[in-house]
Amino acid sequence: MRRAVWILLWILPRLLAAQQADLSSPRATIYTHLENLKPGHYHPEISALTFYGLPKDAARDKALKLKYIYAGYGLNVDYNQIPNAPDYTDSIHFPFPRRAYIPFPLRLRDVYVEKYGGRWYYSQHTAARIDGLFDRLYPYGVDFVQHIPAELKIKLLGWELWQWLGFILLLAAAWLVHLIAKRIFYYLLRLAKRKLLPLAFDVARIDRRMLQFSDPVSYLVALSLLQKFIPSLLLSFRSSQFLIGGLEIAKILLWILIFIRLVDLMMSFYVTRAERSASKLDDQLVPILRNTLKALVIIVGGFKLMIAFGADPKTVLAGASIGGLAIGLASQDTIRNLIGTFMIFVDKPFRIGDWISFENIEGSVEEVGFRSSIIRAADTTVFKVPNSKLAEIAINNKGQRVYRRYTTRLGIRYDTPPQLIEQFVEGIKQIIERHPLTRNSSDHTPYNVKPYNVEFVDYGDSALEILVNVYFKTSDWGEEMHGRHILHLGILRLAEKLGVGFAFPSQTLYMELFPEKKPEFPQYDTDLESIRKRMEAALAEFEKIISKY
């Protein structure tokens, strides 16, 4: 009889516990696990029933550890979000559809409930992973609390005194780790730069960007330290959820800042390289690349933040896809211009500062933007041309010419003697030879092309025409204008010295009634030796003039 009573006393609590353990659905199982571990309703033997096929003590240990794991990750179990269907099937998070449910698929994928027979339990996979998860979150366990003196267990503003002391020590250690890690990262970056890159990249700009990059990286290390040891403070669920959630958001923000600083660091290397290249278009590419990369970092970081705040990743991706499609359809011209921008940088039809002409527009390229380019005409008029158009049309890039050609015709009087014309032409050639900006006979002339042309070429209506065709050795419009100024003054002084007169449209009228009235013509000195002396004097004066420039 006594033996039967003992058996009854042993079986009865288990039957009552089994009756209280509702394992009919994922929600019921998780509810049974957590609600029976609350201080006012502490029944670990009932909570242990949520683990399948484990001995009583082992199941009780797993149930307690899983509760600490939820608290250590700062995870709030919302029962309303958990399916209550007995035959719930998950076809998303598993390779094959199965009757299982993962409460936190992003942050705690190894913990899920599964249906065995007709009831729901924490899966055998979960039971096998709990010890590892617990040890990672609580490297010192939780039993050390029993050895803390009672004086340090006095509550102050919701936390016990030892928890406040531990939290302050953690903050101090994290700050110290930040300062040390910042110096180490900066030293390693500078060392890698000196070892891997040439001396040309040893500039203050790059070192400053390295220091700025080291700052958030060291903060990330300090933040990881806080994340690792804050669970060991065994804070209340609300405090743990607030701190762990805040650290997770701060971590995402730090990663965004790290990638932004990384973009700045990469661009500092690119700017240093671009400054040493002949192409000015590389300089214009820097802000476009920097803004594009930073925009991508912010967009991806924004998605991560939305997920951290509880948004469904599938909803975020679906919204981004639909929004991207709508924006793409509404901004086809912008996308076409953006593609045109990249085509300009790939093909390089012009550079910043080049003088280009197309259709009815001619001017200097001032800026190549995301959507359009700015062309400034000679009268300072500004044209904004869509890049899609510039990528398609034929552009005459005068800025990439090796020489700038200049052609004019000099009209001299019909009564100029031939020998004077010949010496005048020879004098102009000598001026071109001595001009500091014009191409002369010492320059390479491929295919036997003459470096310049000065010839008596035509009989005009009112003048004998001398062709002057020269090439200025510059790509700058303003410098060419200054070269013309010097050339024109030299020719004028030569004509003045030789007595050559420039013609203008005129008519000569002869009066037969007054034969004694004969027209007045200039008197030319036709002595060859005298002409040569005057030409030498003009050339010597020209050399004095060009020495000033």
Image (spheres, rainbow, N blue to C red):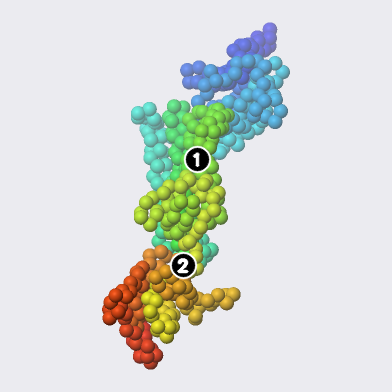
Circle 1 packing at 10 Å, graded few (<14), some (14-19), many (20+), is: some
Q: Nearer the viewer, residue 539 or 308?
A: 539
Tell me: 49 left or right of 226.
Answer: right
**In the image, is residue 355 above or below residue 388?**
below
Residue 13 visible within the image: no
Quadrant of the drawing holding the C terminus: bottom left
Residue 432 visible within the image: yes
Q: Position of residue 95 (x, y in %)?
A: 70, 31
Residue kind at label 2, given as amino acid type? Arg
Residue at the spot x=49%, y=32% of the render?
306
Label 1, on which residue? 334
Residue at the spot x=28%, y=81% of the render?
516
Quarter of the rendering containing residue 56: top right
Q: Position of residue 474 (x, y in %)?
A: 44, 69
Residue kind at label 1, given as amino acid type? Thr
Q: Position of residue 513 (x, y in %)?
A: 29, 75
Quarter of the rendering containing residue 408: bottom left
Q: Secondary structure at mark 2?
A: strand
